[in-house]
Image: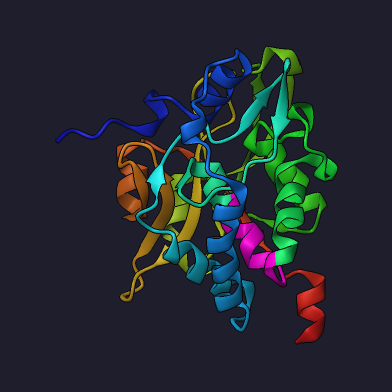
């Protein structure tokens, strides 16, 4: 079976654009928040004794492998009320990362919703315009929140991107500290389980085409743990193969940080 590169197919930005245009969503496709939170709550409880945060990210993301991929996971638009969506039965690439990250940062299940809102929305305000639509802004927002920090490697370069996918948000220009794909693959010893890797797109008007977590197998092979649109589920995939198939030129890295409240207890 021939596998098409991610960067030629629908991206999460395509999905968000369709939502903004008022695409219909079946109520049968929406997971009740309480049902999703029950499973997430169990994972938070089971991961609580694991430290540092990389271990909790590894445990929680690993437990969610085989969960199906689905777009249209967030609900709202410029003229449609935003709804705060919590689900564990299906993810796109970004909602997988932010759900796992929120669960790893929450000290207990009761904190999860607030942590997720703060990761997904500026100032935790549930509003379409406060949502981090572009992944560059998602990263910047969560660096400012001390949720993550940026990781660069020797050989990183600056890339300027003009984005205009969401016309309602206006044209924006990002200056990205990008790591060439070859440099990234050659420096796996500087990577940490749970690092969030963003794959920069070559297409105009967009910043990234995909995101996922760094993982390693038992032999130390570098893996991408991600919600895969082409494979229809969350899975682990050899990073070198993903980079080659998708002709990845540049990536960025974010390293999740230990919450101060949890760090203070250790």
In this view of the protein, which residue sits in the foreground, 59 or 114? 114
**Would residue 79 be found to the left or right of residue 232 on screen?**
right
Say which of 179 and 60 sits in front: 60
In the drawing, does residue 76 fall left or right of residue 19? Answer: right
Quadrant location of the N terminus in the rendered image: top left
**Image x and y of residue 101, in percent:** 62, 58
Question: Total label count?
Answer: 0
Rendering coords of residue 204 (x, y %): 55, 18
Prevalent SS, magenta region? helix
Residue 154 shows up from this direction:
no
Location of residue 19 with respect to 240 vertically, above or below: above
Identified at 59% across, 81% down, the residue is 50
Residue that appears at 61% across and 48% down: 33
Q: Which contiguous range is marked in magenta?
A: 98-109
Q: Is residue 9 above or below residue 140?
A: above
Q: Quadrant of the C terminus?
A: bottom right
**Picture quarter containing residue 215?**
bottom left
């Amino acid at each position: 079976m021939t596998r098409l590169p991610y960067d030629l197919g629908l991206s999460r930005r395509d999905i968000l654009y369709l939502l903004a245009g008022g695409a219909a969503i079946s109520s049968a496709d929406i997971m009740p928040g309480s049902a999703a939170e029950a499973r997430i709550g169990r994972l938070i409880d089971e991961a609580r004794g694991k430290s540092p945060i990389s271990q909790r990210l590894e445990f929680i993301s690993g437990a969610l492998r085989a969960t199906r991929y689905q777009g249209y996971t967030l609900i709202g638009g410029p003229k449609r009320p935003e709804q705060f969506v919590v689900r564990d039965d299906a993810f796109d690439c970004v909602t997988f990362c932010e759900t796992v990250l929120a669960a790893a940062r929450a000290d207990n299940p009761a904190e999860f919703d607030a942590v997720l809102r703060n990761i997904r929305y500026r100032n935790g305000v549930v509003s379409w315009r406060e949502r981090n639509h572009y992944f560059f802004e998602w990263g910047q927002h969560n660096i400012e929140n001390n949720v993550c920090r940026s990781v660069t490697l020797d050989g990183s370069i600056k890339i300027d991107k003009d984005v205009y996918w969401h016309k309602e948000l206006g044209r924006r220009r990002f200056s990205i500290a990008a790591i060439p794909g070859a440099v990234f693959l050659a420096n796996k010893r500087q990577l940490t389980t749970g690092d969030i890797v963003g794959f920069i797109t070559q297409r105009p008007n967009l910043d990234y085409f995909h995101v996922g977590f760094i993982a390693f197998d038992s032999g130390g092979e570098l893996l991408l743990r991600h919600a895969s649109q082409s494979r229809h589920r969350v899975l682990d995939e050899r990073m070198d193969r993903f980079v080659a198939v998708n002709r990845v030129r540049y990536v960025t890295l974010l390293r999740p940080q230990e919450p101060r409240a949890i760090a203070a207890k250790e």
